[in-house]
Image (cartoon, grey):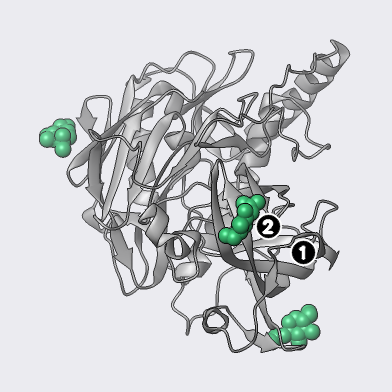
Amino acid sequence: MMKTTSLKYLFSLIAILIFSLANGQHAPKCDIEEDQSSSDLKIIHVNSPCSPLRPKTLTLSWEHTVLHMQSSDKARLQYLSSLVAVPSIVPIASGRAVTQNPTYIVRAKIGTPAQTLLVAVDTSNDAAWVPCTGCVGCSSVTYNPVKSSTFKPLACGASQCKQVPNPSCGVKTCGFNTTYGSSSVSANLVQDNITLATESVSGYTFGCIQKASGPSLPAQGLLGLGRGPLSLLSQTNNLYKSTFSYCLPSYKSLSFTGSLRLGTSRQPLRIKTTQLLKNPRRSSFYYVNLVSIRVGRRVVSIPPSAFAFDPNTGAGTVFDSGTVFTSLVKPAYIAVRDEVRRLMGSATVSSLGGFDTCYTVPITVPTITLMFSGMNMTLPQDNFIIRSTAGTTSCLAMAAAPDAGVNSVLNVIASFQQQNHRILIDVPNSKLGVAREACS
Ligand SMILES: *[C@@H]1O[C@H](CO)[C@@H](O)[C@H](O)[C@H]1NC(C)=O
Ligand SMILES: *[C@@H]1O[C@H](CO)[C@@H](O)[C@H](O)[C@H]1NC(C)=O
Ligand SMILES: *[C@@H]1O[C@H](CO)[C@@H](O)[C@H](O)[C@H]1NC(C)=O
């Protein structure tokens, strides 16, 4: 039953696609010039119509884009749960290809003179690495250490070398191997200046990729915004005090309109906050305490176990910038979805890919409120309903967490739900803040 509906949708997608191609879709007007004066780091969605990294094979069809994002989400969620897995348990998805790509990119300038790379930001990761010139298996845009007067390789004996996964001492320099999604990376640990927006950090330690394989590496490198030992936050603690905020623009945004603001200055002073929790199972994740969910005016009935924060298993709720659609453990998702369906009365429900609550009439549910301890985050329709460009289909833009097998399941508050909000991460005060902000 479900299968036939999805198939029907797929065919109508293809029909829409052919139709729009036949109509000669206009290329969007892109404005991706750099703003030299801003001390905010500009953010764009990696697959935005104007993103320099948008895959050439991606069409501009709305449905196609949605299905593509859903499939990357599935892999991302499996990757996140594999990170919280109890080490003695075999990670999920072994033998299955796991691809996942972080979804937002910023400009980072590395070295002297500066070399610009479009690195992916990932709030659930500590690592930073970029493809280096000569790298086997990397994309064509690379960082060339030879051309930088401030570049320094790190020796085996350096204290930072003890913090990387699988360190190895090749030709005296500190090397390491790591994985990201289903990709693997072999890199040297190096130091150079990094300039994010207008501020320059000298002697920043990161990985210089020599060899890469697999489908899920961000093309021009990764900037982890997690809070573990070698992260950007830990390295710049004197400068930024482990505090930052960001506003993610819509995936449809035509320019770098989002922003990443590092440090304590210019942060919102009056902002609703909830406690930021730290889970030793995964020290880089930003855990919060989700307690219930309100759909319209009704708080839906969800067993507390669905939200329980558990330092022993890694279960709980995290804010993540790399997943697109919020994923809730099954009992929580079902309760939310059923209330939306109840409010929609007799309207015919259909599905689109992984979304199971879609309508061809407007969805009338005005708000969904994520209730955290001490903070309610009331989402307007734009943050929980995804509408086709033609306006003919609307879907509840959340999903049930994929079955994680032996791994504990995470609730993930994802980017679609965060977009056009400022999210403040204040590690020293253990606070996560949320305020509406239109960064489109
Ligand atoms: C890199 O750092 C050095 C030493 O702190 C500084 O002199 C130089 O101006 C920096 N370069 C850039 C491009 O910021
Ligand atoms: C890391 O990967 C490289 C290249 O794939 C390999 O030659 C090396 O043995 C690996 N080192 C470790 C410590 O696993
Ligand atoms: C969140 O909303 C509920 C009503 O649905 C209210 O009882 C509660 O006090 C609110 N919490 C905060 C922190 O505003």
Q: Could you tell me if residue 262 is visible in this image?
A: yes
- Is residue 154 shown above or below 416? below
Compared across the picture, whether 434 is left or right of 121 comes to left
Q: Position of residue 290 (x, y in %)?
A: 27, 48
The residue that appears at 35% across and 36% down in the rendered structure is 266
- In the picture of the structure, the residue carrying the numbered disc 2 is 99
Compared across the picture, whether 255 is left or right of 372 comes to right
| Quarter of the figure that contains the N terminus | top right
Residue 171 disc label: none
Residue 145 disc label: 1
Q: Amino acid at mark 2?
A: Thr
Q: Position of residue 285 (x, y in %)?
A: 41, 60
Ligand 2 shows up in the quarter that is bottom right
- Is residue 417 shown above or below 193? above
Crowdedness near tag 1: few (<14), some (14–19) or many (≥20) residues, C-alpha within 10 Å: many
Q: Amino acid at mark 1?
A: Pro
Residue sitting nearer the eye, 337 or 238: 238
Q: Position of residue 69 (x, y in %)?
A: 63, 40
Residue sitting nearer the eye, 389 or 194: 194
The residue that appears at 68% across and 36% down in the rendered structure is 47
CA distance separating discs 1 and 2: 29 Å
Q: Position of residue 7 (x, y in %)?
A: 70, 34
Crowdedness near tag 2: few (<14), some (14–19) or many (≥20) residues, C-alpha within 10 Å: many
First of labels 1, 2 by sequence position: 2
Q: Could you tell me if residue 301 is visible in this image?
A: no
- Is residue 316 shown above or below 336? below
Q: Does the numbered disc 1 mark a residue whose Cβ is under 8 Å from ligand 1?
A: no
The residue that appears at 63% across and 87% down in the rendered structure is 156
Residue sitting nearer the eye, 316 or 174: 174
SS class, disc 1: helix
Residue farthest toward the top in the current orientation of the protein: 23
